[in-house]
Amino acid sequence: MKVNRNLTVVFLLFIVGLSLISLFSPPRLFSPRENRYLAQRPRLTLNNILTGKFMAAYEQFVTDQFPGRDSWVLLKMDVERLLNKQESSGIYFAQDGYLLERYELDERWLRQNADYISGFAQRTGLPTTLLLAPTAIAIYPEKLPPGAPTDEQQLAWQLVRERLGSGVELIDVWDSLHGHKQEPIYFRTDHHWTMRGAYYAYQALLLQQGKQPLPLSSLKSTIVSSNFYGTHYAKASWRRLQPDEIEVLHPWPAPAVSVYYPAEDLRRDSLFVSAYLDQVDQYAYFLGGNHGIMQIKTAANNGRSLLVVKDSYAHCFLPFLTAHYEHIHVLDLRYFSLSVSQYAQEHGCDEALFLFSISQFSQPASLHKLSQD
Amino acid sequence: MVFSSLTFLFGFLPFVLLVYYLAPRRWRNGILFLVSLVFYGWGEPVYILLMLFSTIVDYTCALGVERYRGDQRRSLYFLLASVIINLSLLGFFKYADFVLRSLNSWLGLNLPLLNLPLPIGISFYTFQTMSYTIDVYRGHAPVQRNIVSLGAYVTLFPQLIAGPIVRYSTVAAQINKREETVDMFGQGVQRFVIGLGKKVLLANNIGLLFDQVKLLNPAELSSLTAWLGVVAFALQVYFDFSGYSDMAIGLGKMLGFTFLENFNYPFMAQSITEFWRRWHISLGTWFRDYVYIPLGGSRQGAARTYRNLALVWLLTGLWHGASWNFVFWGAYFACFLMLEKALLLNWLERLPRFIRHAYALAVTAFSWVLFAFEDWPTIKQFWRAMLGIGERGLASPFDHYLLANYGPLLLILVIAATPVPRQVVQKFLATSQRPRWVELLYPAYALLVLVLSTAYLVDASYNPFLYFRF
């Protein structure tokens, strides 16, 4: 019968064709879309086969190096959306093009992390401030698909407040951010807040410390990119979304500033690194991405020195602080293994600021390193 | 290796087909034997030895049975040897820890567990190889004198790890002589592609719904959540399992074999008796022919009949997994089957069709909870929620979310679980005076399913193998 002949031809062309392409195309090393290294052809040894390691690695290799991998993944997401799927890899497809990541409250880690910071404040005696940044899902819950499960970040924040010792001041940024939620204070496709969002948190911080924040009107706004697709976009793998803009707010004319990266022995005279705007991770435009240590020297000329222990939410936040401190020492404990208190002492820091997103603070965030002497 | 993987579809399968069809006919059983061992060893290489051992044991035992055909006693010894060895393999690898755990908890002992990885598909192939020796003993199948041919039967990769349980008598003639044709290959493609779609596109995706429900605290289930979870689980198991059987039957056809059907729209059943005639048919008939009937079946009075039913169903339950919930699952069905035999079937006959249908669906729905969960408190709370007497009422906002996300897929699955799609195809496409272009719909549909399945496999964050306990 003709039908069966046609079926046979189509089927064989499909599986043999793709096998051959897969066999003869050179493996890719890195996937820019997924922002990760891809599995390579595993080594064929007797031992690897007997333990089954070879087979497991080979399956991963075939999946990672499948011809046209990105197009297949994107096709899948299109079908998923057609079937009205509202979530992908923990990211919700929310209204107005927002990709909101599900938040999971973990009491154990929230308490643990709060304790590490209280302990640090007690041992060093430094005036210590903690700023916990809500993630976008906490500010825009009304944009979520109805009934989408996620935990309350307000609850997490309360939990930390009750747990913290008296030596740590917890900054309340909720009203400030909620009050400006009509403005673009979070990226739609990335897990960070925008520089504008960071500004309102900065404002709350300074007011609660009884200081005068730079007024927004004194800052110049520049759109440095309008084709930014962030980490949530990569995670959710759905292509039919508008990119984000990256807005920079800075005093004008820009005061002199320099950033020193001891690990690379590199000095830059700007807080912003334009080269990253051509790369996938455009958020690295702010301070050049994650580093264990960054030392910022500003024109504030007041002798004050601040220690900042942070995650990447700090990167678009710190530029505002350059008006208030002459020295800012920025530590990222994921890439820093020395003693923090010793570092603070050696560099004459007289205040400490801890800045994390609530989501990061609900996980193991390497803060145990604070307990080292 | 599993069929629903890129390695199988774009590595193993094209390679096997190429070698198989390039080789002369007399080599083909040998090739099947070899590639099936590779297929089996892909996950756990050591267990290839188990395959070879099984092959040798049953080869020898059947030859012994044949040789002493006139001598009842000796021939029976060989049969018993095969049955005992096969059941010991199954018992050792699958049930040893279960027995140890049960002893530990009843007698307060502290016997160490073996923690052996279960050889994949052991429940399927031990039943298959046993059937070979038994069939030879009963004179239902000729003895196989070529060990490579028997090896090809024992390890035949299409049905090796997830059924159907192919009896030797079904394929005896095909093992020795089979005719592969383009026509048959095309039928095989059609069947394989449908099975692949069932597994990768339907079962895996509805499985995500059940997984979300499973993560919830069972005390906090609303009635609707529990029902969504149960329906999702039932559909996942059906499409996964029948998809695997379809792929097996299809692959068999591509290689020139014809296997028996394993599923026949089970959710259309109007009684539990009928459900089990439509669900995993090869297992039901195996137990019928090798356990139930030898015990006397239903011909030795009511008491014996019920004893036999109870025994067969406890064993059927235990076959599905080495833990108590599977035993209860079997007992649950035994109760309904006995009840139906005694009186329910007579009553049901007088009721309207939709009530009979609803009865069968409801009884199976509650059974899936026993199948899915191991611990009694969870099962109880799940049942309470299903009955609407849970603490969380009838519906929750989360149900709204689940329905929005899985509603369209559920609709597709429910339609696909009925014979309606097949009837539509037969009515409009399979008529003799169809227009020429209609013929193109088959390959176009196959290509669509292949492309979508590939897309889902490339982004395979979720592709479970459900039979790791069988």
Image (tube, coloured by chain):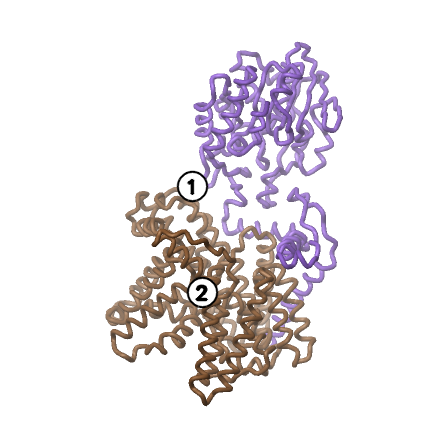
Chain colours: A purple, B brown
The amino acid sitting under disc 2 is Gly
Task: Give the vertical position of B52 relative to B449 (above or below).
Answer: below
The total of numbered circles placed on residues is 2
At 60% from the left and 18% from the top, the residue drawn is: A216
The answer to whether residue A280 is above or below residue B360 is above
Q: Give the image location of residue A48, x and y in percent.
A: 66, 56
Q: Quadrant of the C terminus of chain A?
A: top right
For residue B385, above or below residue B81: above
In terms of depth relative to the viewer, which is nearer, B46 or A120?
B46
In terms of image quadrants, where is residue B419?
bottom left
Identity of the residue drawn at 29% across and 80% down: B299
Q: Can residue B384 be seen here?
A: yes
Q: Is residue B369 above or below residue A327?
A: below
Residue A186, position as x, y percentages in the image: 56, 31
Which residue is under mark 1? A147
Chain hosting mark 1: A
Q: Is residue B325 found left or right of B162 in the rendered image?
A: left
Amino acid type, callout 1: Gly
The mark found on residue B91 in the picture is 2
Dot 2 crowding, Cα within 10 Å, few <14, some 14–19, many 20+: some
Dot 2 lies on which element? helix
Task: Name the front one of labels 1 and 2.
Answer: 2
Which secondary structure, mark 1? loop
